[in-house]
Amino acid sequence: MIFAAGLGTRLKPLTDHMPKALAPVAGKPMLEHVIEKLKASGFDEIVINVHHFANHIIDFLKAKDNFGIKIWISDETDELLDTGGGIKKASGYFDEPFLVHNADILSNVDLKAMYDYHLKSDNDATLLVSPRKTVRYLIFDENNHLQGWVNKDTMQTKPKGFVYQPEVQKEYAFGGIHIISPTLFNYMGDEWTGKFSLMDFYLNTCHKAHLGNYIKEELQLIDIGKPETLAQAEDFIRQIH
């Protein structure tokens, strides 16, 4: 599943006229880069959620003949559902583990290797992480199971009651790519409806769901959601190819 429904407010004024997913990077929309990487990794069925300028994305896919694979649209034009709500709305498409990828992320991650790693695990979800320096970290135990989240600047933690213990826990930066098994939907009861964040769901469910990680030590990743990173993305693409 590719998240392509966002408003792209950080890319204004460009996104006043087009969806963020169609912003050009090295001569092609960022969405095309992601689809091509998924295809090259062996994925041949994709769900794309849409909201902002939804018809632009639908028309683009039609013009490209869906890149020769099966592509379904999860239509959120009535209400933008955020990451968690978007996945729950699209849940009927998934009867086996699926990869979740933002339209505005480019990386050097081997997506097939990550997917195969998840299949061998007992995880309900596997999150891409790396040891890069940041402010906000996901916290894992010695078995690489998600325990919580911390903001190192403010020392705010999530979920409620989570105690940050750096001497016994592992901290990693999240890379914005997930592999999810349909078993995860068993934890999305009535309290998780409508618009909600997938990360909030993870943090409030990690004490009962099996949420693991896939560690990429030499992660090269760029989030092209801002004008300055959009300008850097062309060089980034040359580096990772």
Image: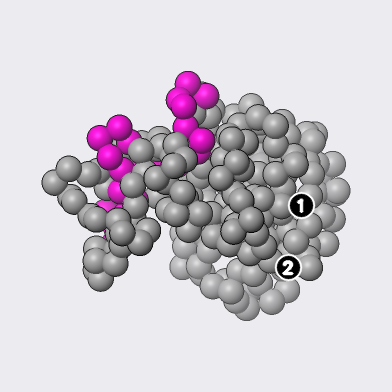
Amino acid type of the residue that numbered disc 1 sits on in the rendered structure: Ser
Farthest left residue in view: 167
Q: Where is residue 221 shown, x and y percent of the image?
A: 43, 48
Give the class, few, some or many, for how many residues have Cα within 10 Å of label 1's Cα (few <14, many ≥20).
many
The residue under label 2 is: 79
Q: Is residue 90 left or right of residue 33?
A: right
Amino acid type of the residue that numbered disc 2 sits on in the rendered structure: Glu
Above or below, 55 against 70 in this view is: below
Above or below, 203 against 214 in this view is: below
Give the class, few, some or many, for how many residues have Cα within 10 Å of label 2's Cα (few <14, many ≥20).
few
Farthest top residue in view: 120
Mark 2 or mark 1, earlier in chain: 1
Q: Kindly tell me whether residue 86 is visible in this rendering.
A: yes
How many angstroms separate mark 2 from mark 1 (CA)? 12 Å
Q: Is residue 202 left or right of residue 8?
A: left
Above or below, 145 against 234 in this view is: above
The residue under label 1 is: 74
Q: Where is residue 98 shown, x and y percent of the image?
A: 62, 35
Provide the secondary structure element on which disc 2 rests. Answer: loop
Q: What is the quadrant of the N terminus in the image? A: top right
Q: Residue at x 51, y 48 (%)?
A: 106
Which sits in the foreground, 88 or 189? 189
Q: Are marks 2 and 1 in contact (CB under 8 Å)?
A: no
Farthest front residue in view: 190
Which sits in the foreground, 2 or 162? 162
Above or below, 15 against 99 in this view is: below
Find the magenta span and give its range: 119-144
Q: Residue at x 50, y 67 (%)?
A: 226
Provide the secondary structure element on which disc 1 rests. Answer: strand
